[in-house]
Amino acid sequence: MRAGLRALTSRGRSFLASGIAALLMAVFLGENDLFRIGVLVAALPLLAALVVARTRYRLSCARRLDPPRAEVGGEATVTLRLENVTRLPTGLLLIEDTVPYALGVRPRFVLDRVEPRGVREIDYRVRSDLRGRYTIGPLSIRIADPFGLVELTRSFTISDTLVVTPHVAALPHVRLSGEWTGGGDSRTRSVAAAGDDDVAPREYRQGDDLRRVHWRSTARHGELMVRREEQQWQSRGALLLDTRRHAHRGEGPRSSFEVAVSAAASIGVHLAHEGLGLRLVTDQGAEHLTDTGLSYSLLDTLAVVRHSPARSLEMGVSALRQGGGDGLIVAVLGSLDAEEARELARLRHSGITGVAVLLDVSTWDGGDPAAEEDYQAAQTVLAGYGWRIVRLPAGTSIASVWQDAAGRGGRFVLNPAGGAA
């Protein structure tokens, strides 16, 4: 009963106050009819509170997100499934799901009645223009009487997470040269490119393709010998993202920082789909990515990346140097001076391809001379060490300038098989 009184709505409190006032006036004036009216008006919210407080609904709730990852600006559908697990029908139910402000207003629904063992499914959509990991839930249910005098709230405990990932642009295929390494320290060795004398054959096994029979070894050993399968190697690379606050300009979704994050996501997903074993590094050091579902792991990490207070790229450069074995380094950079560019540029040597995506932050600053000077200095230093430069000004998509990463020539080509051609 105490819980029911606390759940009185404004209308219920007004009824109770009016009933009490009518009772006092009836006693003072000696009006029996007014006394009866006062009893009725005061008793109505009390009876409603008693009925609602004694209501024992048993409901189960499940929530489904489709998809569980949504790109910035994209929509996701949330499906709520409510089941009445008792043998009694429910009354009026007011349903409200907890949604962060960035995903929109809280959705509210009214269910008039759910029959015994009945199931109701409710859909609503959420959308966000900001990256992040958002918790949806818990679901709250308000039980109300037919007159709207009492509302009692009950909440479930379950919640789900929606990941809003950066925008990923489809990039054109370009030639990227460099050294390719496998699971160990060995270099790639293509059987197709080797001479017959260099092939290491093995004995024929049932099911082997006869086109792979090595006749010279067969004659030498007196039994059918076939060429070994080409060893599958996976190329390795590193992606550096500059998250330093002072290196970027602008605020909101169109800031240089958000453009850098989107560019890193686009490049990372593109290279991962072409078979590159990728690792992510920021100015704070190396980020952990799972080996399985590399694209999803990368996007989940970039969804929550934030500005860092660092003033230099020292930790990021150190993490790149300690990792080793990278045949390709792609750096997505904000503003950096000549000395910072020189420290990064020294990572590239023979057998490693370096691609620098330089955000021209002066175009976010309205033509700041200092930022333009830093850009020119960094570009000169990196190009001098053999890095390929991709200029990314404000209002330009990474897809439209990614061709500049091809540079000139190239010995190896990224391909979906993860090999070299």
Image: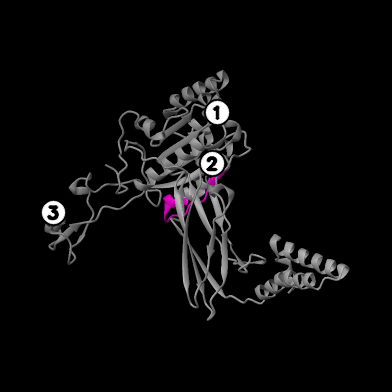
Task: Label 1, secondary structure: give it.
Answer: loop
In space, the residues marked 1 and 2 are separated at their CA atoms by 14 Å
- Choose between 243 and 50: the one closer to the eye: 50
Residue tagged 2: 282
Residue tagged 3: 216
- Asked whether the beta carbons under mark 1 and mark 3 sit within 8 Å of each other, the answer is no
Name which of mark 2 and mark 3 comes first in the sequence: 3
- Asked whether the beta carbons under mark 1 and mark 2 sit within 8 Å of each other, the answer is no
Which residue ends up furthest to the top in the rendered image?
Answer: 369
In this rendering, which labeled residue sits more in front, label 1 or label 3?
1
- Asked whether the beta carbons under mark 2 and mark 3 sit within 8 Å of each other, the answer is no
Name which of mark 1 and mark 3 comes first in the sequence: 3
- On-image quarter of the N terminus: bottom right
In this image, 170 relative to 308: left or right?
Answer: left
Name which of mark 1 and mark 2 comes first in the sequence: 2
Residue range (magenta): 285-297
In this image, 183 relative to 421: left or right?
Answer: right
